Amino acid sequence: MKAGLVAKLAKQVAKFYEQAVNLTRDKEVTRCLDASWIHHMDFQRECFQGAAEYWQSHAVKEEALATGKGFGEEITRLTRAGTAVLLAVLLCCCGDKLHGTC
């Protein structure tokens, strides 16, 4: 599977998790849903966002190797991927504190 396709799939999954998180802001849903699920969805969203940036960096690198241009975008995408994964780890460790529910 090509890196660009994997990036698009991961980005769409991240969007689905974002939509799910937004739906949990409804009071009826919050009342029925354990808070750990909200943290889990936040964690998954950031993981997939990081994966999307990582795989898009591979697609950009392939093009950069062919044209000699675009290596800066590759580095930017890898930096974004690292930031998203770091945020996912922070959500995992400190989710309640980051959400203000602790």
Image (spheres, rainbow, N blue to C red):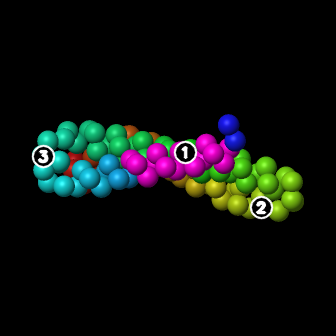
The local crowd at label 3, few if under 14, some if 14 to 19, many if 20 or more residues have their Cα within 10 Å, is: few
Residue 20: give x, y in percent of width and height: 32, 49
Upstream in the sequence, badge 1 or badge 3?
Answer: 1
Q: What residue type is disc 1 on?
A: Leu
Residue 27 location, quadrant: bottom left
Upstream in the sequence, badge 2 or badge 3?
Answer: 3
The local crowd at label 1, few if under 14, some if 14 to 19, many if 20 or more residues have their Cα within 10 Å, is: some
The residues bearing labels 1 and 3 have C-alpha atoms spaced at a distance of 31 Å
Which residue is painted at 66% across and 59% down in the image?
A: 76
Q: Is residue 81 left or right of residue 34?
A: right
Q: Is residue 12 left or right of residue 5?
A: left
Q: Please tell me whether mark 1 or mark 3 is closer to you in this view.
A: 1
- What residue is pinned by disc 2? 70
- What residue is pinned by disc 3? 31
**Secondary structure of residue under mark 2:** loop
Q: Please tell me whether mark 2 or mark 1 is closer to you in this view.
A: 1
Q: Is residue 75 left or right of residue 84?
A: right
* Magenta region includes residue 49: no
- Residue 81, numbered label: none
The residues bearing labels 2 and 3 have C-alpha atoms spaced at a distance of 48 Å
Which residue is painted at 49% across and 49% down in the image?
A: 12
Residue 75: give x, y in percent of width and height: 70, 56
Q: Is residue 52 visible?
A: no
